[in-house]
Every structure is written in C-alpha cells, then in structure tokens.
Image (spheres, grey):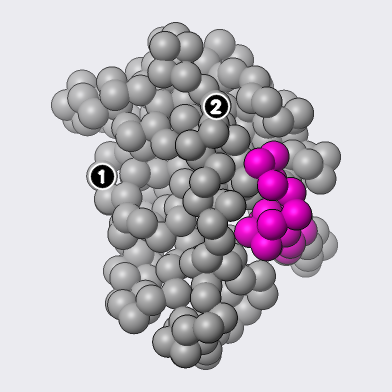
Amino acid sequence: MAGERNRIITIANQKGGVGKTTTAINLATALAAIGERVLIVDLDPQGNASTGLGIDRKHRRLSSYDLLLGDYGIEEASQETAVPNLYIVPSTMDLLGIEMEIASQSDRVFKLKKAFAKEEAFRFSYILVDCPPSFNLLTMNAMAAAHSVLVPLQCEFFALEGLSQLLETVDQVRRTVNPHLDIQGIVLTMFDSRNNLAQQVVNDVRTHLGEKVYHTLIPRNVRVSEAPSYGKPAILYDLKCAGSQAYLQLASEVIQRERRRLAA
C-alpha cells in the first residue's frame, strides 16, 4: 500500500520443523545488517526466536503477552539484541494462556494490530512476527496485523500439500479480518543439492507458484543449526557459512521486492 511507513511481515507455517524461527531470526539479522531498523515479535510460546537471539528467560520482564493484553506498548516491551538495529519483543510461557484470557473480547483478533498502530511501531522499517506452528488466535492476530505473510517451506515430499493448507488459511484471513493481506513470498529451506527429491520439490513449487517463490534457496547447514544453542543468529555465529550467505541474499530479495511493489 502506498504511503506505508513500515512493513509488517508475518512468518508462518502450520507445520513445525520447516525453518520458520530460523528464518525469522536470520532474515531479521540480515535486514538489520543491511541497515534497516528491525523488530521481531516472538508470538511462539516456545520462545525459540527469543532464545536464538540470546534473550535469557529470566531477562524477559515484559513480553508479547503484555503487548497483546494492551498493558504495555512496543517501546516498553522491546529489548535490544546483540545485533545493531535489531530489537525483539520476546515470548514467555504466559502466551499459553492468552487465548482463554482474550477469547470473550470482541477485538481478540486485533490485539496485535492495535499495538502496531501506535506511533512507536513506526520507528522500525520492518516488523517480523514469528508465529507458533499452528493456526490459533496468536497466528490470527499476526495475520490480522500484517501487510504480508512470508512462508518458509522445507524441501520435502509433502511440502506442496502443507502449503495449500496455509494458502487456504491466508485466503480465510483475507475474507474475514484483513482484506489487504498478501503473500510476501515463499522461501525454500533445508535444501540439499545432493538430494534429487529436494530438487524436484523446488521445481514443483516454482512451477505451481512462479514469482511468489524466492530465488534464494536456504541450504541445510550445520552452522545454522548450531547457532541458536549459542544464543546467536547464524550471521553472527559464522558469517561465511552457506546458510548465512543465503539469508543475506534473501534479505536483498525482500528489499528488492518491496522497492518494486512501492514503485508499481
């Protein structure tokens, strides 16, 4: 939409283990490294994005739970990370009970949207929301608040089947609460060039979805897998590894798409 002051991207897939949180952490880090001011909102009760950026659980005084309740804003709930220009609203286990707390409220789907509408949200060029691996009220809030959805898709046999379910979910959100929601792009993750099936999945997804699929392939990479246990994004842990370089390429693609969209 013309005149946007920031870009809110929800990173979602109803299937777990597809590289969703890894993509959130490393895409955010790559965007920050390029010079963008970035906020991650961790909406997954597991809190892996928070842990992967080195935010210890005992230091999560305020969280996305407080943001959804409306008790605190982004300014108060966000924390600096070790990455310059990258901030996070961390997650806590309190999120497990949020659905019961807000289920009876008429604006239950728009809690996050209200937080993002405040002036403090516009200090960031990009806001990335890391969703839980399920379609629940947290994911609905993320999609209702977003301009677009970025979908990480593992290069495996059932990839297209899972993707069709997610695209149906996006259509449902479009029809009910966010008519402007778009597919930001589909990023293929855990690609193994030695695996013929992985290449077949890439070909099939690109045949079915064309330009929606990013050119960048995120490889299966040991260094990317190791990084979260050190509380670091892969780009800080090992900048030269293939996974880090792929996420830097993905960030460039995201920015290029945004420039083309705004120029259209």
Mark 2 lies on a secondary structure that is loop
Residue at 38% in and 48% down: 177
Q: Does residue 140 appear left or right of residue 209 in this picture?
A: left
Residue range highlighted in magenta = 235-253
* Residue 224 seen: yes
Residue at 58% in and 52% down: 223
Q: Give the residue pinned by disc 1.
A: 136
**Residue 89 x/y as whole percent:** 51, 25
- Report the front residue among 125 and 188: 188
Q: Disc 1 vs disc 2: Cβ atoms closer than 8 Å? A: no
Position above or below: 184 against 41: below
Q: Nearer the viewer, mark 1 or mark 2?
A: 2
**Residue 57 x/y as whole percent:** 41, 18
Q: Disc 1 and disc 2: Cα gap in Å?
A: 27 Å
**Residue 189 x/y as whole percent:** 51, 66
Badge 1: residue crowd in 10 Å (few <14, some 14–19, many ≥20): few
Nearest to N terminus: mark 1 or mark 2: 2
Q: Give the residue pinned by disc 2.
A: 54
Position above or below: 260 against 120: below
Badge 2: residue crowd in 10 Å (few <14, some 14–19, many ≥20): some
Which disc, if any, is residue 197? none
* Residue 72 seen: no
